[in-house]
Image (spheres, rainbow, N blue to C red):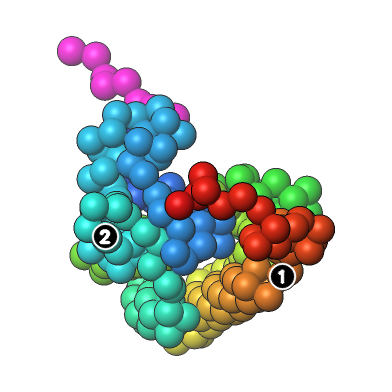
Amino acid sequence: MGPKPTRAHPVRRRMRLSDEAAAYVRERILAGELRPGEFIRSESIADELDISATPAREGLLVLQSEGFLRVIPRKGFVIAPLDPQDINDVFTAQALLAGELTARAAARAGDSDIHVLNELQDALERAAHDEDFDEVERINHSFHRSIFALAGSPKLQWMVGSTLGYAPRKFFAAIQGWPKASAQDHRQIIEMLSAGDGDGARKAMADHVLEAGRLLTEHIERVHAESHADDVSEDEAPRDDAHEEDAHEEDAPGLDEQDTTETT
């Protein structure tokens, strides 16, 4: 019996359709493309993702359980306000978990592992320079996943993975400063891993994650401020149709000059 064929690259399984729908809407909310108070329909999400309405609705129900959406009876799903403190809390937890995984990886990383990380970082910096944000996202994900896998702690890796939904991936360009932060901080992490410095690696990774959380929190606060300013402007803006109606009423004869028999 011959040797089993090997794959040059692992195949990434596609997410469940409901998870894909949830991730798509979650990222648009975090990126500020969907604003608090906007209604969202499962049929629209299904059309945009080319999936059926059932998994799209299941994805929206997941987001409701996470606090991203609310349900208004007989109207449907509406985008809930994002609390910046909630975002900060999630990234604080992620920093603790990611820092511990990186500290454990420092005790296990070999020369070949460091070489792979340096190659990933070189590619990430090229993509950031070219403003290829899709590629930045892909390589950044591979960089972190490679480090976490080195730790040999699958349960911790699963736990940190549960917090990653709050980090916008497809919409990197919308988060001011995010690609730059991803490209700059990694060199320090690699240096600590190469030196086998567990405490230094923990701090470098935790600082990196907390900085990403700070950038996202600032972005959410900015989106809230812009949304509030837009609402105020709409409320205060004069209505042309009201002015035209007033002018028309001034030119029109008074009711006492008109035959009102048809209006009674």
- The residue type indicated by label 2 comes to Val
Q: First in sequence, mark 1 or 2: give its number.
A: 2
Quadrant for the N terminus, please: top left
Kindly tell me whether residue 164 is visible in this rendering: no
Q: Position of residue 59 (x, y in %)?
A: 28, 47
* Amino acid type shown at disc 1: Ala
Out of 83 and 89, give the one closest to the viewer.
Answer: 83
Q: Secondary structure at mark 2?
A: strand
In percent of width and height, residue 92 lies at 40, 83
Residue located at (34% from left, 29% from top): 51
- Label 1 Cα neighbours within 10 Å, binned few <14 / some 14-19 / many ≥20: few
Q: What residue is drawn where x is 32% and y is 21%?
A: 5
Residues under labels 1 and 2: Cα distance? 30 Å
Which numbered circle lies on residue 237?
1
> Mark 2: few, some, or many residues within 10 Å (few <14, many ≥20)?
some
With 1 as the anchor, is 31 left or right in this view? right
Q: Is residue 95 left or right of residue 16?
A: right
Q: Is residue 252 left or right of residue 144?
A: right
Q: Is residue 3 part of the magenta span, yes or no?
A: yes
Residue 142, relative to residue 231: is it above or below? above
Q: Residue at x 23, y 45 (%)?
A: 58
In front of the other: 139 or 49 = 49
Q: Which residues are magenta?
A: 1-11
Residue position marked by numbered label 2 in the rendering: 71
> Residue 28: image x %, image y %?
50, 54
Q: Residue furthest top?
A: 1
Element class at badge 1? loop
